[in-house]
Image: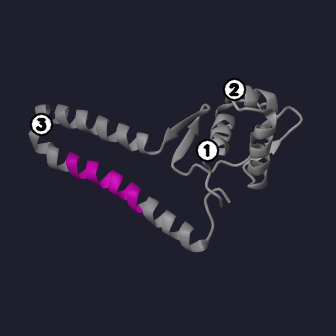
């Protein structure tokens, strides 16, 4: 699949953030594109790629291709944000636990290392099989 870049990428990300289909003119205005024909050209290319579809109300995303992002309430959040929040919370809990019971620290630390290690192992295996099967999660 062709990689998204430049104007095409801007249009795709813009459509991802919208709750409802968007008209061609609105896309052109919101993204400060020079003309509606430029927006239409890129929208047609995105349609050919199977990423965008045109409805009677306007254009909308047909397929999510951002493997490293999760869409939550029309906001794109990197997957790594969840692990970062896990580590920050774990660090705070470790400090609290150390002050309360220093003997529980080795067990707690082992769990904190095992959880993300397991998540990364599953992710690596999943990506390995995706790569070798020629398919992606979005297929």
Q: Which residue is mark 2?
A: 30
In front of the other: label 1 or label 3? 1
Where is residue 19 drawn, in percent x and y?
70, 30
Q: Rate crowding at label 2 as few (under 14), some (14 to 19) or many (20 or more) other CA atoms within 10 Å.
A: few
Secondary structure of the residue carrying tag 2 is helix
State whether residue 23 appears in this view. Answer: no
Q: Report whether 96 appears left or right of 28.
A: left
> How is the model colour-coded?
one colour
> Could you tell me how far apart the alpha carbons at marks 3 and 2 are, in whole angstroms?
56 Å
- Disc 1 element: helix
Assign the C terminus to one quadrant of the image. Answer: bottom right
Point out residue 36 in the picture as x, y percentages from the top left corner. 80, 34
Q: Nearer the viewer, residue 100 or 78?
A: 78
At a point 28% along the width and 39% down the height, the residue shown is: 90
Q: Which residue is mark 1?
A: 6
Residue at the spot of label 3: 101
Q: Which residues are magenta?
A: 108-121
Q: Report the front residue among 72 and 108.
A: 72
- The image position of residue 42, as x and y in percent, is 74, 45
**Discs 3/2, front:** 2
Q: Is residue 79 left or right of residue 113?
A: right
**Of marks 1 and 3, which one's residue comes earlier in the chain?**
1
In this picture, is 70 found above or below 17?
Answer: below
Q: Is residue 106 magenta?
A: no
| Mark 1 / mark 2, whichever is N-terminal | 1
Gap between marks 1 and 2, in whole Å? Answer: 15 Å
The mark tally for this picture is 3
């Amino acid at each position: 699949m062709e990689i998204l870049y430049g104007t095409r990428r801007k249009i795709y990300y813009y459509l991802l953030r919208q709750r409802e289909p968007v008209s061609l003119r609105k896309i052109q205005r919101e993204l400060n594109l020079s003309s509606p024909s430029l927006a239409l050209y890129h929208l047609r290319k995105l349609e050919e790629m199977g990423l965008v579809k045109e409805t009677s109300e306007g254009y909308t995303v047909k397929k999510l291709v951002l493997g490293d992002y999760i869409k939550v309430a029309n906001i794109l959040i990197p997957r790594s944000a969840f692990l970062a929040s896990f580590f920050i919370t774990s660090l705070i809990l470790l400090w609290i636990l150390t002050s309360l019971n220093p003997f529980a620290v080795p067990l707690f630390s082992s769990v904190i290392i095992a959880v993300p290690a397991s998540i990364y192992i599953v992710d690596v295996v999943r990506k390995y099989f995706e790569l070798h099967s020629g398919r992606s999660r979005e297929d």
